Amino acid sequence: MTSVLASAQGGTRADDVVLDVRDLRTYFHVMDGTVRAVDGVDFQIRRSGRLALVGESGCGKSVTALTIMRLIDQPPGEIASGEVWFDGRDLLTLPADQMRAVRGGEIAMIFQEPMTSLNPVLTVGDQIGEAVKLHQHLRDREAFEAAVQALRDVGVPAPERRVKQYPHELSGGMRQRVMIAMALSCRPKLLIADEPTTALDVTIQRQILELIKEIQERTGTALLLITHDLGVVAETVDEVVVMYAGRIVETGTVEEVLLEPRHPYTRGLLSSIPSRGKRGQRLSVIKGVVPNPFRMPPGCKFEPRCPYAWETSVQGEPTCAQNEPELLSLGDGRASRCWLHDPRFTGRLRDYERPTAGAEEAR
Amino acid sequence: MSGPDGGAAGGGPGEAGNGVPIVEIEDLKTYFPIRTGILRRLAGYVRAVDGVSFEIRRGEVFGLVGESGCGKTTLGRTLLRLQRPTGGVARLEGRNVLEFRGRDLRKMRRRMQIIFQDPVGSLNPRMPVSDIIGEGLLAQADVENRWGERKVRDKRVGDYLEEVGLRRDYARRYPHEFSGGQRQRIGIARALALDPEFIFADEPVSALDVSIQSQILNLLLDLRDRHDLTYLFVAHNLSVIQYISDRVGVMYLGKLVELSPVAELYANPRHPYTIALLSAVPDPDPRVRKKRIVLTGDVPSPAAPPPGCRFHTRCWLREQLGDPEECATIDPPFREIGGGHRVACHFAERIREEVSTAAVIGVEEPPGVPGGADPISQAS
């Protein structure tokens, strides 16, 4: 692996890295074969840093998060390789009881669907209280007060009344606030938010995004955001990791990735978003669909859909269809998994970097 | 899978129809009774659609936006007679569809079709695609179209599968064999096979990934041009609505609050709710800094909508104007303010243009200027 992101060999390199994921592979063994949901993922989040895992459904972004939390059912799942360094410990080798202390205590997670992730037969206060009792060893009375305070912190009006209510009595936005209150009640060092606003309406999404940003800045917790929405990415995080078919295809800062995408997939994704200025034109399209996980293409996983893929007749030269590129470092923490960035193909890269209007019109 | 490339290539959204209304809706109301207790006593109504009037012009895409529970889907379903109306009139080319019975009703169904949001739930998993698409044909069969004959029907099913960019032989397969985007194409073929004039597209791309979403949007626009369709396009994604619509209506709690040609609405919104809605949309361009207007609280219950203007409980403009009384007492009329732009707000003229521009379009900062999101030092 020449991945730039895995460059820190041996122990957590510096104090400022809170999460260091290395060569993570999570497979699922099912009846039809093996699905390599996550297949060699490396990234780091700095203390108080904000990073987004971006990609479409099935790209492995949620499985990555669940693997970090060790919430993968084994079997059918299998964490085939990798290390998850969190505060000097490899979470993947941690004994179960210590992992329980990390989960919900030092690393908290909020999910997409606030209704199904809350327990319908317990009050909101009981559920927040459960976390603080477990992790901070508070007594009932203290836990209740901690729950009221946690709700107040996330902007729930009349927290003394809300704390005694059941999830079905709350609106979707209010439930998501409760989830966030619960996640933050133990002052985690890392907050994993898996599509936290996808199920919400746009004005409620705005409230929740503002809340997450405000809390992140106030408490200094690191944020791992998982989303498919590039708009949410643009305003919530500093660094972006783009995933496709279980692999990282591009990394960089949010400005770099969203304004100057280097990988053809990222570029296709960005240009297929309907937005102002595109009215009256056909939308550019990424042709085809994501590959069948049981029949992954042998070379680059994006090759069947890539408008820039090429064939070569030169002996010994790699081809997109047959040889999978590595995540090539482009300096400054940027990386892209594409043959275009191989020094042998600078000519092609030049063409790619000055796209003609029609070049993206892949239909 | 690419969309079929027809004669009307490059068919982006054109200009708003030819001005002739195909559908006219007047004071449409759809209420759902709330029943409580074991005696199912009537306790009130959820006013899902509560007095909506507008027209859809032939050939246009009329976009309807609003948050969940605002009544946009119920409105469309009432129009198609999939939901019993409580009051009002809905005309299809001059005839009130809400009064159709028997044969007339069945004939009308052929002319007005629906595309559903959920490409999984809307296709019967036990039916092959040929039956899913063929079912409607069979129901509408007559001596003229001979859709009652298996051969004729199967040919038509195959034709329309090709029309939406799928292979003819997919007719034998079952829904689970398809991806989300393909299933949505099947749903479109099902609607299209009946040769409708008007299609109610109910969140047709909301369940799809971005890259598939753009394929379906292109397809819908191609089909509009090839088959002279008119769409009522419901979505909560404001970028999708902006891209596809000719005119847009914004709904809040069962009522239309604003209606305008699309460019005007997105550049110069006049209702405080629309402005807040547009300002809330996250922009994928990290340089864009919008002046966010964050609405407080949740949408009130449509079973007990606030008196006066329904938006007044969350309205930022009312707050800025010092809580004028009429907001809480008088339901603002849906009035024309010029250029086909209608708005239901007492104080629409009091909104300063800078305010709406900063909130809706945002300020683009040139790259490299400090003040953009922190450039983080990657190296170490």
Image (cartoon, coloured by chain):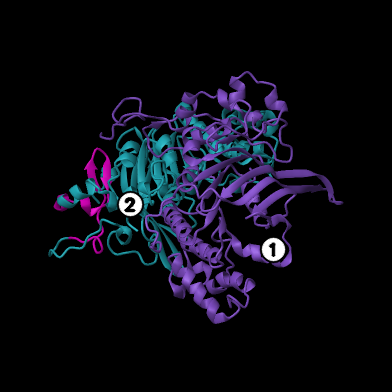
Chain colours: A cyan, B purple
Query: Closer to the camera, B342 or A60?
Result: B342
Query: Closer to the camera, B79 or A90?
Result: B79
Which residue position holds label 2? A265
User: Is residue A323 shown above or below B150?
Assistant: above
Residue B313 is situated, as x and y percent measured from the top left of the image, at 66, 29
Q: Is residue B326 visible?
A: yes
Amino acid type indicated by mark 2: Tyr
Gap between marks 1 and 2, in whole Å?
Answer: 48 Å
Residue B96 is situated, as x and y percent measured from the top left of the image, at 69, 54
Chain ID at mark 2: A
Q: Horizontal placement of B37 versus A6: left or right?
A: right
Quadrant of res B317? top right
Q: Is residue A207 visible?
A: no
User: Is residue A251 shown above or below B156?
Assistant: above
Which residue position holds label 1? B105
Residue at far top of view? B322
Query: Closer to the camera, B373 or A95?
Result: B373
